[in-house]
Image (tube, grey):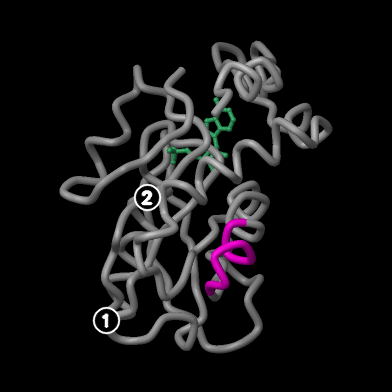
C-alpha cells in the first residue's frame, strides 16, 4: 500500500482558517482518484475482519471516507452532524472548543444496542470532536470498536482523548 502517494496528494495550506494553523487540504487527494482509492483500500484492509454493524462518519469530511468504506464492507452508514441538520429525533453531545463549546448530533435510531461501531473522520487534531462522537455512540448503547482517520496530527496527541479505544490512522503528520 502506497502511503507516500496519499501523503503527497494532500496539500498543506498555512495560516488557514486562522494564523498558526497548518490546514491539511484533502481536496487535492480527492482529485487524484488512484490515491483516494488507495486510502479506501487501506481502511478496507484494516477493518474487513472487524465485524462492524455500523460506521459513523463525522461531518463533513468524515463522510467522504466513511461512505465508500461502508459500501465496500456492505455495512450501514450513520452520520454525526452539527446541530439542527438532522431531521428526526436526535441525541446530542456538547464539547469544548478552544473558545466556547460546540455540539454534535446523531439520529436516535442510527445505532442499536450493542452494535459494533467504527467512528471515522478525515483528521484528528485535539481529539475533541471524535471523543464527542464516541460519547454519542455510548449514549446510544453502541459498542465502539475503534476510530479511524486519514490523518493524525500526532504532535497534538488527540489519540490520548480516545482512550481506551483503538485508533487507526493512515498518516501520522
Ligand atoms: P479536533 O476536534 O481538534 O480533533 O479537530 C478535528 C476536526 O477539525 C476534524 O473534523 C478536521 O476535519 C478538522 N481539523 C482540525 N484541524 C485541522 C487541520 N489542521 N487541517 C484540516 N482539518 C482540521
Name the image quarter holding residue 88. bottom right
Residue occupied by mark 2: 147
Q: Quadrant of residue 69?
A: bottom right
Of residues 169 and 74, the one nearer the viewer is 74
Q: Is residue 24 magenta?
A: no
Residue 151: image location, x then y, percent: 50, 30
Give how far across and how far down residue 156 sits, in percent. Answer: 34, 23
Q: Is residue 36 left or right of residue 54?
A: right
Depicted 131 relative to depicted 135: above or below: above
Query: In the rendered view, would you say 23 is above or below 133?
Result: above
Whether ligand 1 has any atom under 8 Å from the Cβ at mark 1 is answered as no
Is residue 72 left or right of 132 when viewed as pictured? right
Q: Which is more toward the observer, 172 or 156? A: 172
Q: Position of residue 17 (x, y in %)?
A: 66, 25
Residue count near mark 2 (Cα–Cα under 10 Å), binned few <14, some 14–19, many ≥20: many
| Main SS of residues in magenta | helix
Discs 2, 1 touching: Cβ within 8 Å: no
Q: Secondary structure at mark 1?
A: loop
- 72 magenta-colored: yes
- Tell me how many marks there are: 2
Magenta segment: 69-75
Judged from this view, the residue extending furthest toward the left is 164
Crowd around label 1: few <14 · some 14–19 · many ≥20 (10 Å) = some
Q: Which mark is residue 114?
A: 1
x 71%, y 21%: residue? 9
Quarter occupied by residue 138: bottom left
Amino acid at each position: 500500500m502506497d502511503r507516500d502517494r496519499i501523503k503527497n496528494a494532500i496539500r498543506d495550506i498555512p495560516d488557514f482558517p486562522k494564523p498558526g494553523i497548518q490546514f491539511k487540504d484533502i481536496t487535492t487527494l480527492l482529485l487524484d482518484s488512484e490515491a483516494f482509492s488507495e486510502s479506501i483500500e487501506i481502511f478496507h484492509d484494516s477493518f474487513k475482519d472487524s465485524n462492524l454493524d455500523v460506521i459513523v462518519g463525522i461531518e463533513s469530511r468524515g463522510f467522504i471516507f466513511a461512505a465508500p468504506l461502508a459500501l465496500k464492507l456492505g455495512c450501514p452508514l450513520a452520520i454525526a452532524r452539527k446541530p439542527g441538520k438532522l431531521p428526526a429525533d436526535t441525541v446530542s453531545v456538547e464539547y469544548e472548543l478552544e473558545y466556547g463549546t460546540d455540539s454534535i448530533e446523531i439520529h436516535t435510531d442510527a445505532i442499536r444496542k450493542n452494535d459494533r461501531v467504527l467512528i471515522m473522520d478525515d483528521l484528528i487534531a485535539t481529539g475533541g470532536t471524535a471523543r464527542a462522537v464516541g460519547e454519542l455512540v455510548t449514549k446510544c448503547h453502541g459498542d465502539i470498536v475503534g476510530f479511524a482517520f486519514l490523518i493524525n496530527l500526532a504532535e497534538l496527541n488527540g489519540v490520548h482523548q480516545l482512550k481506551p479505544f483503538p485508533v487507526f490512522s493512515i498518516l501520522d503528520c
